[in-house]
Amino acid sequence: MIAMNNRRYAMIANEVWDGVSGQCRSNLAVIVDGEKIESTCPVDQVPREIEVVRLGADSVLLPGLIDAHIHYSPWMGPAFLAAGVTSVRDTGNDLDWIAAQQSRNSSDLLAGPQIISCGLLLDGPRPYWHYIGRGHPDANALRASIREEAKRGLRFIKFYDGLDQSFIEAGMKEAKELGLWVLVDFGTDEPKAVDAVRAGINEIEHLTGCPVAWHNSSQAEQDQLIDMLLARKVVMTATLITYCQLGRMQEMAYRFDGRQAWAHPTYRDIWRQIPPAPLAQRDKFQEATLNQKRFVKRLHERGATLAVGTDAPFAYILPGFGVHDELAMFVDAGVPEVASLRAATSGNAALLGLEKEVGRIETGFFADMLVVSGNPLKQIHNIANVECVVRRGRVLPLEQLKARSVDECGKTLDDPITRDLQRYMASAAQKRASSNAS
């Protein structure tokens, strides 16, 4: 493997996928100079004076993956990188805290991926999350928060379930004037999406607010909503994994997933303490997952923009590795491997406004890449066979990432998402105790 202080080198894999094309290319070298990709060229044209890194006979080099929906905690950084995720979008966190994490990850490449922030969850009068969200008693307060987040340099803001339609309309007017991209999490399958789309929202998370995605709807019913999404260019970040996990948390596979070695002990405890939903609700989530897959397939067939996100670290969703799971679910739903991988690379890069920087193996782009064994364009599960990761031109061996993970997982956590989840668990335990006492 290349020396860590070498700034110019050529990486040669068996095949290279650029993040856009319909297939991989062979006999191609990727030349890296500093943080960026200098060029690509045939293997026999690599300059003799630079160091060459030859990868395995079954190796495939592709752009770093991007997770468009997470809530960051410091322990998650090395796990993201080990899974080949080199950029993430945090969709709800304390403003000052996440800004510090952005700075840390920029200066310490082993700490974690590039972070794009949506700031706080902007909620209604009774905020659901205490530390990663903010409540608003009226529309004027919401508009003030939007202006504050715009002044902080955010390009994305997130509306949460407690905002009713009048709040959304007032907030969208402010956001449009400031040129902000608005994503919405409606929290449930109640029919809220149509009115919000008419108000101008840009993106929907978790398929919430879209009953046709949750129920056994006809194609005509699906198309009625999809027509509106297409006309207004609304992006859907499906996070199929989220409700799938909630419906199957009692299964042994989740409790004994070996990848949990990358998870902080606090989170392993939190996940195991999550009270199982009643059987009827678990059945609802499992049935909804099948219907959501059908809807995602139809979205793809109609040409809607699908983003790849996971909602890590909720409900056994492992940072980074959850992207592998989400991609497998996309393919299982009927979205071809290449289209699924485009969504997680060049597609997510375009969504995050990074289309000139990451998501492709192309001259002038940052050298954020991963190497896997086996071609994931032919078999999506090969995306999990990560051999090494490159972040900003620096090769990050898996053993170094594991060592950093062990270090981070040995620290006591005191970050916003962890505090909120611990608060949620304490509240749930108190409710169970009261119920049992009665």
Image (cartoon, grey):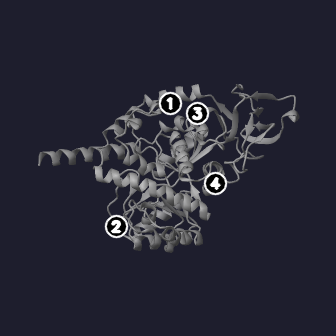
Q: In terms of depth relative to the viewer, which is nearer, 179 or 301? A: 301
Mark 2 vs 3, N-terminal side: 3
Q: Which mark is residue 340?
A: none
Mark 1 vs 3, N-terminal side: 3
Q: Amino acid at mark 4?
A: Gly
Q: In terms of depth relative to the viewer, which is nearer, 395 or 54? A: 54
Residue that label 4 marks: 347
Q: Is residue 65 above or below residue 407?
A: below
Instruction: Report how far apart the C-alphas of labels 4 and 3 lie in the structure.
Output: 25 Å
Residue 321: x %, y % from top left: 52, 39
Mark 1 vs 2, N-terminal side: 2
How crowded pointer 2 is (Cα within 10 Å; few <14, some 14-19, many 20+) is rated as some
Q: Which mark is residue 405?
A: 1
Q: Amino acid at mark 2?
A: Pro
Residue 115 seen in render: no
Instruction: Report how far apart the C-alphas of labels 4 and 2 lie in the structure.
Output: 36 Å
Residue 72: x %, y % from top left: 48, 44
Callouts 1 and 3 close, C-beta under 8 Å: no
Residue at figure coordinates x 44%, y 53% from the top left: 289
Residue that label 3 marks: 110
How crowded pointer 1 is (Cα within 10 Å; few <14, some 14-19, many 20+) is rated as many
